[in-house]
Amino acid sequence: MKKCHACGTTIEDETVSRRDECPGCGSDTRVCLNCTFHDESRANQCFEPQAERVKEKDRANYCDYFRFKDEGRKDSSREDASKLWKDLFKKS
């Protein structure tokens, strides 16, 4: 399920062009914050190493690697990884 990064409104469109806006809040939808490759911990905050740097992550851009983040899929986070690591070595 595709959701707006700003307001959480569900986006029904299959493809998202650079000019598309969220029907709920009017913010741009083809932005880094809505992309599956967006990762705060990576260089340029992008998991795709060949992507060009985008300064404004909340504004529409021309990135060729953009893939709308699927909210139905759970992305693992650092907290989840840390918890699993601690559980692995927990003393019984």
Image (cartoon, rainbow, N blue to C red):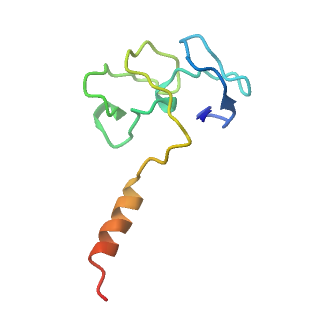
- Tell me: 22 left or right of 39: right
Question: Relative to residue 92, is residue 39 depicted above or below?
Answer: above
Identify whether 24 is placed above or below 16.
below
Residue 71 percent location from the top left of the image: 55, 40
Q: In the picture shown, does residue 16 fall above or below 2?
A: above
Q: Which residue lies most toward the right here?
A: 24
Task: Indicate the quadrant containing the C terminus: top left, top right, bottom left or bottom right.
Answer: bottom left
> What is the count of numbered marks?
0
Residue at image coords 25%, 22%: 50
Q: Residue furthest bottom?
A: 92
82 on left or right of 3: left
Compare residues 89 and 59 and report the one nearer the observer.
Answer: 89
Coordinates of residue 90 in the picture (x, y in percent): 30, 81
Q: Residue at x 33, y 43 (%)?
A: 41
Q: Which quadrant of the structure image shows residue 14?
A: top right
Q: Is residue 20 left or right of residue 65?
A: right
Give whichever of 71, 43 is nearer the camera. Answer: 71
Give the quadrant of residue 6: top right
Residue drawn at point x = 52 percent, y = 30 percent: 34
Return the x and y of residue 51 as percentages of the image width and height: 31, 21
Percent across and percent down for residue 55 are 40, 23
Q: Nearer the viewer, residue 5 or 69?
A: 69
User: For the N terminus, which image quadrant?
Assistant: top right
